[in-house]
Image: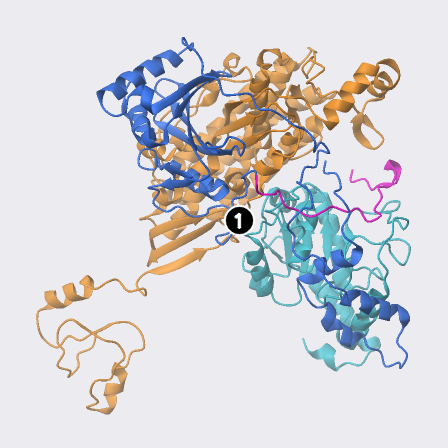
Chain colours: A cyan, B blue, C orange
Amino acid sequence: MGIEEKLPAGILLTTVEQIAGYARKSSVWPATFGLACCAIELFSAGGPRHDLARFGMERASATPRQADLMIVAGRVSQKMAPVLRQIYDQMSEPKWVISMGVCASSGGMFNNYAIVQGVDHIVPVDIYLPGCPPRPEMLIDSIVKLHDKIQNMKLGVNRERQVTELEEAGLRRLPLTAGSAVHSGAGQSATVQAGAVQPGALEPAGRLQLGLIDQSVHADDTGGMR
Amino acid sequence: MTQPNEPAQGGAAQGGAAQGGAGKGAGDDSTGQGSTAVPDPAALAGRERLAEQVARSGMFGTMTTGDTSGYGGLQVRRAPRLASPRPYGSYFDEIADRLADSLATGGPSFGAAVEQVVVANGDLTFYVQREHLISVAAKLRDDPTLAFEMCLGVSGVHYPTDTGQELHAVYHLLSITHNRRLRLEVTAPDADPHVPSLVGVYPTCNFHERETWDFFGLVFDGHPALTRIEMPDDWRGHPQRKDYPLGGIPVEYRGATIPPPDERRSYE
Amino acid sequence: MTASADNQAHGATATGSADTRDSDYDGYDDYDEGRVYNVAGGDWDEIVSGAVGDDRSSDEHMVINMGPQHPSTHGVLRLILTLDGETVTELRPVIGYLHTGIEKNMEFRTWTQGVTFCTRMDYLSPLFNESAYCLAVERLLGIEAEIPERASVMRVLLMELNRISSHLTAIGTFGLELGATTVFIYGMREREKTLDIFELITGLRMNHAFIRPGGVVQDLPAGAIERLREYLRVMPGLLGEIRALLDHAPVYLARTRNIAYLDVTGCMSLGVTGPILRAAGLPWDLRKSQPYCGYETYDFDVATQQSADVYGRYRVRMDEMDQSLRIIAQCVDRLAGTSGPVMIGDAKIGWPAKLALGPDGMGNSPDHIAHIMSQSMEALIHHFKLVTEGFRVPAGQVYAAVESPRGELGCHAVSDGGTRPYRVHFRDPSFTNLQAVSVMSEGGMIADVIAAVASIDPVMGGVDR
């Protein structure tokens, strides 16, 4: 848009952020990146029972140029990895990635020569969704969380500030020991947000490689994940 | 079902490995510089950690055999392959006799072509000499009493301990006319992994032979285009051989816990 | 073609070079691409034959890549098409984008754990993968005769339900790829009902790992028979809706009649089985010819068509779904009101746990835990050894085949006498059937390539394994 670069931080920028966030989240177009079994659950999520059309997502764009969201659904093999990266590069900003299923999040049950052990080796991931395959309801839950993230994305000056803060926090973060525990908590969902520091005000993670040691599940500073 | 292998060689190496591809760790240091004169000791420690030598990068190579059953000391002796005596039972005798007659009219003799006949688990297996594979297959396909019209593909097996016969190519044939099945097995040593291609007799073997070449390094002479089919074209090695590791990464559980069942989320 | 004052009257001229500039307008002869044939008198036939006889340069034929990411290729299949206008002159499929190393991975797990792996190969028909594998293992173990009757009936029930759900996906995505999105919605809606039944019986919607060597894991839960009867009551009508939508739709017929023809000879040489072979007219079905799991005791027909085209394959799939409903009705009759074991009685092989629903989901039933912890040391030892080490399978090799929705799915299992498979190779029908796509599509148009691929219904998880 460009307008957000010129606005000073303040109520005007915040309002623009909220409006832009609302517009962006209301019709996220997924890029069809169904690879394996999770793709079938993705189809089911688009079916009449679990309806993705209520989010404006039923128009899955085959061309990545018009897509906002890449749902990596399924196991990514070594042969497919460069294709995945190419499709991701062809998507235009702003773009988000949900890695659907355990195979996309971490290699899943296939800890072997042929499968990339997590697509975050290749593309930055915003939401990790475990499951083998995750139910369509879980996929919708992750999409709703992504909507939260999109809605609260900061723009312009605010974003630069946030990025600096995140970097400093990341450098200060210590690796996990066996004592610190991550708990999903009562009533929490199974989806994990990557790089979460403050829930609800998140940078699409990994767009900057902050040199974080642990980008996976980690003890949350705020003592619980929303 | 996987059990964690030995832990990684220190968190820094693992972190270096995990972020090695991005290579941005060093680059971002500069933006982390605050305007303060005295650097934050914690941030300093962070930068030091990032500057350590990368012990391992890339995703391959387990430290062990990849055996995750925890049973690495198991020594299993394979039973020797015993030829079955006549009579073989059910329709197997008919096939063997008919093939012998058919080969007698032209081509190698049955004894020369088929070195062993094994009947086990309800299947008939002919162990065929690789030089005579094409003639035997052609006879099996063309003879009307045999009529094995359909080949169900090639499967490779690697027996590294079977010196001189390490690579086996197993063909399953199906006769729709007579409703029968047959297995042909061809062996080749590792030193000379060549088997004649059956694409001329059964065109369906095209993809299957490519796959067997891809996974075992078994070269099918006469195949129109023997290239890798499953692995990327520039892959090195033949993955399903026994001397090729399973690969993967050592799995770590970094303090994750699973909450008690009543505190987990329900998707009802 | 320009008429110019050049002296080169016949044959081809090199492009782009300005030989003479007689006037300002001669600059228009400078073409950057394409061949320029100057016709300034002479025999028309000679010029034309000269032009045609040239090697068809690359700008006549386009090489188009229908890359691995494309909505109209069933999963990650890459097709490299050489096009002459809209006609496909050459088609090469490239696979391997979903290769997971399942077969090698199974060599590092016990025989029972292998079920969880092989179930994810052909992910639209997971129960068939499991079934082929378990039949192979049981044949190696020599316990085929000891599989409980109820387990076999449940296997048949689940396989036929899976056939319906797989065909519904096939027909749904078929419509989606041809542009008929309503069919997709209908197919998914029907499929949800089938997945509900799966969830009730096996606990999962997909990738069940329910059929294990020795039988099945669990008996039918309470209420399953009623749900199945309800399902049988509504499904024929719903399938009829899809038929009403497609069977005589003129656009659909125009796009599928006489497209992607492959007759019986072609199928035989390419090793193609399943609906494609039956649409060509040959009624070959392993359930009838080489029955397994008691299929010889069920009353059903083999659906065939004679047209060997895309429409014929569609009709075969619809008919097969009707036959599956027949078989399911017979299974339900056999299961209702009877009871019995569903796992082999041999304690050294059968999966030990008796499962029950607890507060955290399905797990060992409290009775079973009480039995192994306080009543029988032997049962505890068996449970422990079976779960950690697994059972030993005698050395040998076997090939067991089932009729999956896509064709003959075979499992070639080699054992070296240990607790883990020595080698498992799956003869996947989609892998073999995909060789037919070039034969079917070359000479046709691009849109027909989509129809051809859809009619083969390849599942790339099975193709690449």
Instruction: Please say whether residue B267 is one of the residues in the magenta stretch.
Output: yes
Judge by depth and name the residue closer to the eye, A48 or A171.
A171
Left or right, C258 with reference to B48: left
In-image side of B62 versus B123 (left or right):
right
Subunit ID for the residue under disc 1: C
User: Magenta residues, as a range?
Assistant: B243-268
- Would you say the magenta stretch is mainly helix, strand or loop? loop
> Percent position (x, y) of residue C434?
43, 41
Q: Taking the image as drawn, is residue C249 in sight?
A: no
Q: Position of residue A24 (x, y in %)?
A: 69, 64
Residue at coordinates 71% horizontally, 28% vertically from top-left? C200
Q: Depth check: B167 or C77 in front?
A: B167
- Is A3 part of what is drawn in magenta? no
**Image quadrant in which the C terminus of chain A is located:** bottom right
The location of residue B250, given as percent across then percent down, is 72, 47
Mark 1 belongs to which amino acid?
Tyr
Which residue is located at x 66 percent, y 54 percent? A119
Per the image, the residue denoted by label 1 is: C97
Secondary structure at badge 1 equals: loop
Q: Where is residue B164 in the image (x, y as percent from the top left)?
A: 46, 32
